[in-house]
Image: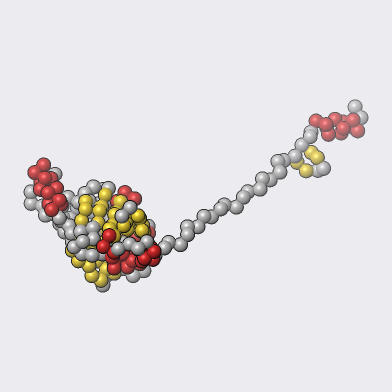
Amino acid sequence: MSQIKKLSLLWLLCPTFSCGQPAVEPPVAVEAPVVLRSPPRVPLARSIDSLNVHADSIRFHVVKRRRVFHVLAGRDTLCTYPCVLGERPEGDKQMQGDRRTPEGVFGFRSKRMHDKWHAFVWVDYPNAESWRRFRERQRQGLVPAGADIGGEIGIHGVPDGMDHWVVQGVDWTWGCIALRNADLDEIYPYIRPGSTTLTIVP
């Protein structure tokens, strides 16, 4: 076979060569990812004013498994903030030193600004239901007879510049609920000791 015929046959058997370039799939254009930005959150005070919410109707609701702190009025959720809990977040508080956040419905005893924790809102724990559960657990042997029920549970902020202690979602308190300082500032004026309620659920 002549050299010319051999080259012609090679051309036909090797379609991968065309114009001196390999026959490859053309590159597929990759779309840039779409970044969805959340709209700016409406400040709590503006929501209360625009909805004509009476301050006495405001209550708080914490969902422990989601680490969220809701501000409610009627059936409306006015605002939601991230929060963190006691170092052992699962389960109801049983006794002093267990570093759990109590569950149930509570009032507030008092509130004040705090040098270290920005502000401290004292939760009415233990209340009558807390004592009932505590004594029942003692009767069942779940809590030692000499144990104390504990107290000094509250809502507080963080040292200045340490909001990441809340944002990171790692529980670190001894049983309290911690908020970012700016979020605590928003709810602080609407806490009425003796009337405002806080519900904490698993």
The image shows residue 194, relative to residue 14, as above or below, that is: below
Residue situated in front as seen by the camera: 160 or 22: 160
- For image coordinates 11% across by 42% down, the residue present is 140
- For image coordinates 71% across by 43% down, the residue present is 26
Q: Quadrant of the N terminus?
A: top right
The image shows residue 8, relative to residue 162, as above or below, that is: above
Q: Position of residue 36 (x, y in %)?
A: 52, 55
- The colour scheme is secondary structure
Is residue 137 visible in the rendered image? The answer is yes
**Does residue 122 appear to the left or right of 22 in the view shown?**
left
Is residue 170 visible in the rendered image? The answer is no
Using the rendered view, name the quadrant where residue 139 is placed: top left
**Does residue 182 appear to the left or right of 33 in the view shown?**
left
Q: Position of residue 105 (x, y in %)?
A: 21, 53
- For image coordinates 32% across by 56% down, the residue present is 72
Q: Residue furthest front?
A: 52
Residue situated in front as seen by the camera: 175 or 189: 189
The image shows residue 149, relative to residue 193, as above or below, that is: above
Residue situated in front as seen by the camera: 28 or 153: 153
Using the rendered view, name the quadrant where residue 181 is placed: bottom left
Q: Position of residue 31 (x, y in %)?
A: 62, 50
**Does residue 65 appear to the left or right of 29 in the view shown?**
left
- For image coordinates 17% across by 50% down, the residue present is 94
Q: Position of residue 137 (x, y in %)?
A: 13, 45
Residue situated in front as seen by the camera: 93 or 8: 93
